[in-house]
Image (spheres, rainbow, N blue to C red):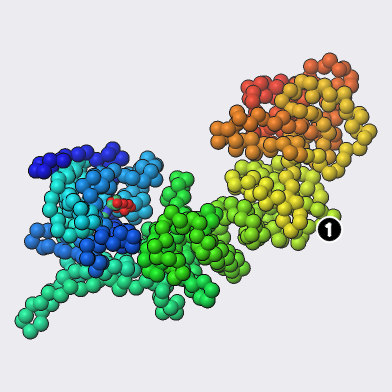
Amino acid sequence: MSATAPVRMEFKTELKQLLDLIIHSLYTKKEIFLRELISNAADAIDKVRFESLTNHDLLEGNSTWKIKLIPDKEKGTLTIRDNGIGMSPESIVQDLGTIARSGTRQFLENLKNADVKNRPELIGQFGVGFYASFMAADRVTVISRAAGPAGHAAKWESDGQGEFTVEPCEKETRGTDVILHLREDAHEFLDPWRLRQIVKQYSDFIEHPVTMDVERKKDDKTTVEEETLNSRQAIWLRNKNDIKDEEYKAFYKQIARDHEDPLKWIHMAAEGQMEFRAILFLPQAKPWDFHFGLPKGGLQLYVRRVLITHECEELLPPYLRFVKGVVDSADLPLNVSRETLQHNPLLAKIGKNLVNRVLKTLEEMRDSEYETYLKFYAEFGSMLKEGVTDFENRERIADLLQLESTITESGKFTTLAKYVAAMPADQKEIFYLIGETRSQIENSPYIELFKSRGQEVLLLTDPVDEYLVTTLNEYKGKKLKPIDRGEAADAVPAEEKEKFKPLLESLGKTISEVKEVRLSARLKESASVLVADEHGVSAHMERLLHRMGRGDETPADKRILELNPQHAVVQGLLKLQTQNTADARVADIGRLLYDQAVIAEGSRVKDPVGFAKRMNDLIAKGLG
Ligand code: ADP
């Protein structure tokens, strides 16, 4: 970098797209840029405070943490100044010229312009906060000096149009000045009253003081006072009874970067053997990154009000990754490093407590606020189901499940406990059927026998259900049993089997897709059905694997074709075959029965044209 001329550089492509979105979209809430910049400044202060615990030199005698807003009406600029960790000339290019997070890139790929227009808060959610500056400014200058006696300063500048410049400069003290050259229509952000209001609304909980010089007139004399705009109270340390709902909500929005209120919050204060405080939030809806398969779980971890990490994943298991919040422990050492957190036994203990409280809250919701619980379940039920791997809490999670069955109305639920309570005395297992949609499996031939016996079958349609039932395996000593595989308990009488033997053998030869053709005791109305072996892969699983592109790795398990000996078509077929073993219609009709079974299980017929032809031949004959 030359000492005189600024170096001109281009933004990385995806950042250009993002800036384009920011500048050319209409925002309803321009002011969120300030929240983003204050939060960056606070992060920078947290970082230097944390690092100075092991490297005292970084402080250079300046540890009065402060974020200062400097509106300048004459120049039309607003400066946000901090004495945080700062950026070196190299890192300023990296930090402000690229998008580091892969999630943001993905986000951009998935997002259409219109979506951002309607939902500006998304920008904050994706950690591209700094660039929100361009919502209010047509030029942004950043002057920063990295912490430490050897720190160099750099000046970064851009109009957000695709390029930025960097040049060395002088700055006496550690930290960063972000100078916004405000657009004409953004001059409201020079008004001290407006700034005070925005800070109160969005950044009141920031631990470090956000200050501003204000003029006060008294007896014709004007004095300037530095005013602290935020109350700086760590809400989790306060007494529950003194905190208004509105305060919890605002705090949630700040830490979760959500614009909706939380669904529920839990304020904990553990004392005695283990001391910690926590506020946990259940959101109303999935955050956007969850939709892109980039779930970032984790709670903010503080040690005596000092932020250690934003995303401590060790506190909660992945199946509770939707929970947001803060934990502040008095027992952890302040210099605990982020790397060793993983192995800290105290964290595991706190975590156990938190899991317990979250599950308890869900149980209470289920029992006394069922509608709210269902709302929660619709959003996060699939994630919660992953929790059946948590051996200690498996039963509690099983009891939180809401399941549809042949007895519930569509969209209404039963539970495993209710199912078991209603089981006839001679029923030993919990029956279920997995498929794509309720209507598909509800009318499938597998259900017929159970319906006729008045037995309830759970109807599972969530993609994770296959994983859920195989992991759970049993509930209160009752095995979970899929009804689309294995032999149906009602055996077919031996003489029936004997009578149909030649037909079944000949069909077995012509329908090479199946492992075996046998008689069925599970069918009441349908003529045919496909079943998997006791330990075979079900049709649903096979479709899932195919969709995941793994169909080829797992050779399709041949299934068993079962025929209903009571059905007129099957009986007619037997008659044809007995009269003339060489009758070509036997094979054709047999194949039609197979195709029907394929359709009934929700799969696709491999040869639809052939299927249509066989059907039409039959219909034509029928019409005479
Ligand atoms: P995020 O803060 O979510 O990482 P930003 O786009 O807001 O995303 O900031 C990008 C990076 O620039 C930050 O991660 C940080 O390293 C750096 N940065 C931004 N503002 C400051 C600041 N005031 N002091 C030090 N570094 C900063």
> Residue 357 appears in which quarter of the rendering?
bottom right
Residue at the (74%, 23%) spot, across then down = 512
- Circle 1 Cα neighbour tier, 10 Å, few/some/many (<14 / 14–19 / ≥20): few
Would residue 43 be found to the left or right of residue 161 on screen? Answer: right
Does residue 607 lie above or below 192 as drawn? above
Task: Pick whichever, 618 or 589, lies toward us.
Answer: 589
> Residue 439 appears in which quarter of the rendering?
top right
Does residue 222 lie above or below 102 as drawn? below
Would residue 184 be found to the left or right of residue 109 on screen? Answer: left
**Which image quadrant: the N terminus?**
top left
Does residue 361 lie above or below 36 as drawn? below
Residue sitting at the far left: 220
State whether residue 503 appears in this view: yes
State whether residue 135 appears in this view: no
Which element is circle 1 on?
loop
The amino acid type of the residue labelled 1 equals Ala
Task: Pick whichever, 127 or 95, lies toward us.
Answer: 95
Would residue 197 be found to the left or right of residue 475 on screen? Answer: left
Where is residue 241? Give x, y as percent. 44, 79
Task: Pick whichever, 532 or 83, lies toward us.
Answer: 83
- Dot 1 corresponds to which residue? 425
Where is residue 290? Give x, y as percent. 46, 49
> Residue 335 appears in which quarter of the rendering?
bottom left
Residue sitting at the far top: 582
Where is residue 333? Give x, y as percent. 43, 66
Residue at the (54%, 64%) spot, across then down = 349
Residue at the (45%, 47%) spot, across then down = 294
Would residue 153 be found to the left or right of residue 46 on screen? Answer: left
Does residue 540 lie above or below 474 as drawn? above
**Total numbered circles:** 1
Where is residue 109? Give x, y as percent. 37, 40
